[in-house]
Each structure stands twice: as structure tokens, then as C-alpha cells.
Amino acid sequence: MTHKSIRQAAEELNFSIHALRYYERVGLISPVTRGTNGHRHYSNEDLCWLSFLTCLRNTGMSISTMKAFMDLARQGDGTLTARAELLTTHREQVCAHVAQLQAQLEQVDTKIQCYQQQAAA
Amino acid sequence: MTHKSIRQAAEELNFSIHALRYYERVGLISPVTRGTNGHRHYSNEDLCWLSFLTCLRNTGMSISTMKAFMDLARQGDGTLTARAELLTTHREQVCAHVAQLQAQLEQVDTKIQCYQQQAAA
DNA sequence: GCTTGACTTCGAGTGTGCTCGAGCTTTTAC
DNA sequence: GTAAAAGCTCGAGCACACTCGAAGTCAAGC
């Protein structure tokens, strides 16, 4: 099988079918090819791209930034540096976020210990 | 000064004034004391609590879970263990989230390098 | 030829977490 | 005594990222 139905793609990516169509509608993925009946056919390339988008999404990138990234990608190889920069900026934001999470995790830990000690007393 | 106006509290906590009133409205903080004119007075205790809530919110706890936590706290010392458990559960979720972020960061890094190499070629 | 099932489009609806504005009161400063 | 500043309540509105449902098409199986 060289391509997949929307259902298969959704299962593989852990997306809803609605979300897949939504991503296409808002331009996060270029229109996928269609069968003669108008049904979408997802190629491996489509799945790869969506999988990377998922990664960006999970790390907190907004739809509009992903859209900007997609628009760069669509413009071809001239935007490779720009794309690297966009991802680097994102990378730094994610790093900062992780650092913040770890700092706050310590506060939570402190509170947990506090409660445990009080409960034991 | 033994208490603070809503404006001062908002500045100190990096909250909006609206958000402070919202938190009280939905029961994330017990009704703060009021001056004779009906204005809110935030005590240090209030600020401490809000500051910890901020920590929970920043680590991704939902308002409704924070509400549950608040409800336990309001019931007194009998709920110390329950509170510790709630926080422990949250802690694990945050840890899992951090791990996921770090894994996905690697994918982003790979992509960045990919782009940089292609741009250099 | 009719049902079933997977797909299509389109526009409206949802949940979360605030955010805002209208209309009012009170205190302070001139 | 009046104007400005700060606060109040209440309900509506907003941004985000989907999510859903109605109404229709198309191909396959009986």
C-alpha cells in the first residue's frame, strides 16, 4: 500500500479524522492527493510531515507558528536557514519551559514533603 | 502594611486584576477579607496560596483539579494525606511531560541539524 | 436498485481559562 | 462640590484548537 486512507492515517498518528482535515484546512499540510472518488490519500511523506508537526504541537508551538513554518517549507530550499532559525527559537523556548517546569517541580516536592511530615506528626 | 490591595497583589504575583477576582469567583482561593469600602485585602497567606496555585497552573494543573485541591485544603488537617497524594499524582504527570518534551526536543534538534547541513551544502 | 459504510464539505459548537466593559460606589485631592 | 482614581459586580466576549453534525457523494455487496 503506497498511501493511506484518512482513517488509517488518523490511527497511525493518533489524530482524529476531524483534526486531520482541520490541519489541511488551515494550511498546516499542503492539500493531500485525492482518489477519483475525492477521498484523501496520505503518502508516507504526508505522514512524516504530520508526525513532525505533532512534535512541534506537543512542545507547545501554536498553530499560527506552525503555519509560518509550513509557509517557509513551501517556498523551497531558499528558506532552509530561516526554517532552522525558527526551530532554534522554538527550541530555546522549549528549553526555558522545561527549566521552569523543573524549578516548579521542586516547589511541589517541597509541599508534598511538608504535607507528609505534618500528616505523620 | 499587613495586607495588599488587589492591584499590589496582581503586580506581585504577575496576575491580572481580573484573573485574581476570577480565581476567587471559581473558588480557588477562599474569599479574601474586605475593607469597609468592600475592597479586597490580600494577606501574606493569600499571596502564598496564590503563589503556589501559580506554580500548579504553570505545571499544567487544570482549574478543576486546583479546585479539588483547594476543597481538600479547606477541610483541614484530615486531608493532609489526600493532598500529598493529589500533588504526587500531579508530580508524576509533570515528570512524564518533561520526559516527553525532552524526547521531542531531540527530534527538533535533529531537524535543525538537517536544515543546517542542507543549507551549508 | 437499494442499503451500507467510508468518505466529502461546510458551518456551527465546545471547553478552557481568562479578559473585558458597562455601570456603580467610595475615597482622596483640589 | 466636583473630578479623578481605585475598586466593586455581573454577564458577555474572546482566543485557541479542535470537535461535531447535517446533508450529500460514491463504490461495493446483496
Image: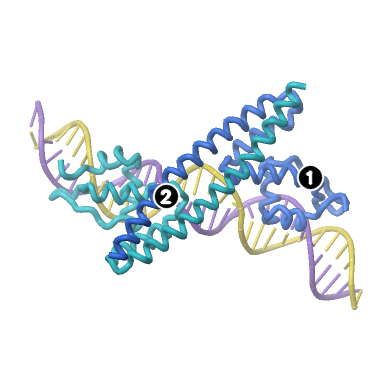
Chain colours: A cyan, B blue, C yellow, D purple
Q: Residues within 10 Å of mark 2 (few under 14, many from 20)?
A: some
Q: Which one is in front in this view, the residue at disc 2 or the one at disc 1?
A: 2
> How far across and how far down the image is residue D13, in percent?
55, 58
Name the residue: 77% across, 44% down.
B46
Q: Quadrant of the C terminus of chain A?
A: top right
Residue under label 2: A57
Q: From the viewer's perspective, is B18 left or right of C12?
A: right
How far apart are labels 2 and 1 at the CA level? 38 Å
- Kind of residue sitting beneath label 2: Arg
The answer, for residue B66, to whether it is visible in the render is: yes
Name the residue: 41% across, 58% down.
A87
Q: Nearer the viewer, residue B42 or C27?
A: B42
Task: Determine whether the residue tagged by mark 2 lies in a helix, strand or loop.
Answer: helix
- Kind of residue sitting beneath label 1: Val
Q: Residues within 10 Å of mark 1 (few under 14, many from 20)?
A: some
> How far across and how far down the image is residue A100, in percent?
59, 48
Q: Nearer the viewer, residue D25 or B35?
A: B35
Q: From the viewer's perspective, is B118 left or right of A120?
A: left
> How far across and how far down the image is residue A13, in percent?
32, 41
Label 1 marks which chain's residue?
Answer: B
Outermost residue to the top = A120
Q: Which mark is residue B32?
A: 1
> How far across and how far down the image is residue B32, in percent?
79, 45
Task: Determine whether the residue tagged by mark 1 lies in a helix, strand or loop.
Answer: loop
Label 2 marks which chain's residue?
Answer: A
A20 in relation to D30, above or below: below
Total marks placed: 2
Marks 2 and 1 in Cβ contact (< 8 Å): no
